[in-house]
Amino acid sequence: MDQPEGFTTVGEEQKVCRLQRSIYGLKQASRSWNTGFDEVIRGYDFIKSTMIVVLYKKISGARLRICDSMSVTLLME
């Protein structure tokens, strides 16, 4: 890692930054989003697929509706 421009000191170019807090929480952001999505989509009576974890289905009458979290993500952007 290189020091950012403007923050280097002559003679201390080899020093690097030290993290003040863990960045582990960033890895959990997608899991948190998926947990919230799962709760909402199940509220609409969708059933989670046992084979494909991002796929949900809902049968109403003669119609089969399929929803996956990737499509919803793209629609939200």
Image (cartoon, rainbow, N blue to C red):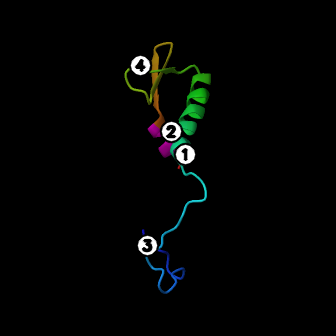
In the displayed structure image, the side of residue 37 where residue 15 appears, left or right: left
Give the residue type that dot 4 points to: Thr
The CA span between labels 3 and 2 is 38 Å
Residue that badge 1 annotates:
76
Identify which amino acid the numbered label 2 is placed on.
Val
Task: Determine the image quadrant of residue 1.
Answer: bottom left
- Tag 3 residue: 2
- Assess whether residue 32 is covered by the magenta stretch: no
Tell whether 1 sits left or right of 41. Answer: left
Considering only vertical position in the picture, is 35 above or below 48?
below
- N-terminal-most mark, 1 or 3: 3
Quarter residue 52 falls in: top left
Question: Does residue 75 show up magenta in the picture?
Answer: yes
Q: Which of marks 3 and 2 is in front?
A: 3
Amino acid type shown at disc 1: Met
Q: Are marks 4 and 3 in contact (CB under 8 Å)?
A: no
The answer for how far apart the CA atoms under marks 4 and 3 are is 46 Å
Residue carrying label 2: 72
